[in-house]
Image (spheres, rainbow, N blue to C red):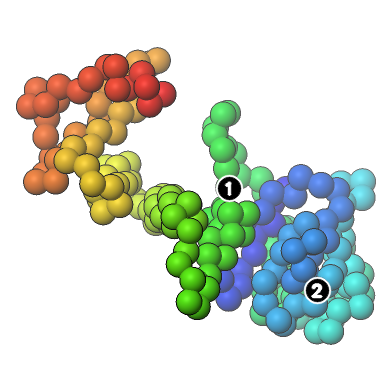
Amino acid sequence: MDLLITGPDGERTVKLQKKRNSLGRSKECDIQLSDFSVSRSHCFLYEENGVWFIEDNNSTNGVLVNGKKVQKSKIDIGDEVTLGNFKLELVHTTEVASGTFYRTLHDFQMDYKLDEFPAVEGKEIPQEEKRKSKILSILVQMAKTLLVAENLDEVLNKIMEIVFEALDAERGYILLKTNGNLEPKLIRSRKGILSKEDLPFSKTIIDQVI
């Protein structure tokens, strides 16, 4: 089962891998809802014998199920749960291909603390911190592209644009695996798209990358 969360920071889907989940503003919660309309430990979402329940944990703004304030309530797919400025809804688990690493953009940002690179007045930010921040910024841009792109070509072209913006590179290659073999899908220079006949790529470099 998944939990669809809509709030001030947008929409995300969280996999409910535990039978009992704590929800709240605190980082200690299983599912963090970063908004002051939510208490630090707001409520619990748990499963018993295949049935899901939500229970208020003495929160300030309470728990609403389909607009009605509850202390504890059974919830089904289609029910709308309100916690402060957040709307929650149970949804069927999204099927993801075997071997695919599935993370939401919000979880990615929270796990890697992308917003926690504050400049200290009068002090220069360490070079290593700058490097980490740049890498994570690139990855977030790519993740956003995956969320909004409508087709594969759009994804690949956008990724290549991000790479050229971030790196001092003259050429870029994107290869995809087809029937076990790596095939060039997009080859570009800073001036535009190239064909593999125009510019052969080095298998040695590919072996180093993978």
Kind of residue sitting beneath label 1: Arg
Image height of 148 relative to 116, above or below: above
Residue 85, image quadrant: bottom right
- Residue nearer the viewer, 44 or 158: 158
**Who's the residue at 74% across and 71% down the image?**
25
Residue 148 x/y as whole percent: 39, 56
**Residue 103: mark:** 1
Residue 138 x/y as whole percent: 39, 52
Between the residue at mark 1 and the residue at mark 2, the CA separation in whole angstroms equals: 24 Å
How busy is the neighbourhood of tag 2: few (under 14 within 10 Å), some, or many (20 plus)? many
Is the C terminus in the top left, top right, bottom left or bottom right quadrant?
top left
Q: Which element type, helix, strand or loop, lies under badge 2?
A: loop
**Who's the residue at 48% across and 58% down the image?**
126
Kind of residue sitting beneath label 2: Arg
Between circles 1 and 2, the one closer to the viewer is: 2
Left or right: 131, with 89 as reference point: left
Q: Which element type, helix, strand or loop, lies under badge 1?
A: loop
Left or right: 114, with 204 as reference point: right
Please indicate, yes or no, whether residue 108 appears anywhere in the rendered image: yes
Residue 40, image quadrant: bottom right
Residue 86 x/y as whole percent: 67, 74
Please indicate, yes or no, whether residue 136 appears anywhere in the rendered image: no
Disc 2 target residue: 40
- Residue nearer the viewer, 80 or 82: 82
Image height of 13 relative to 155, above or below: below
**Who's the residue at 11% across and 34% down the image?**
194
> Who comes first in sequence, dot 1 or dot 2?
2
- Residue nearer the viewer, 143 or 148: 143
- Residue nearer the viewer, 153 or 171: 171
**Who's the residue at 76% across and 45% down the image?**
17
Image height of 99 relative to 170, above or below: above
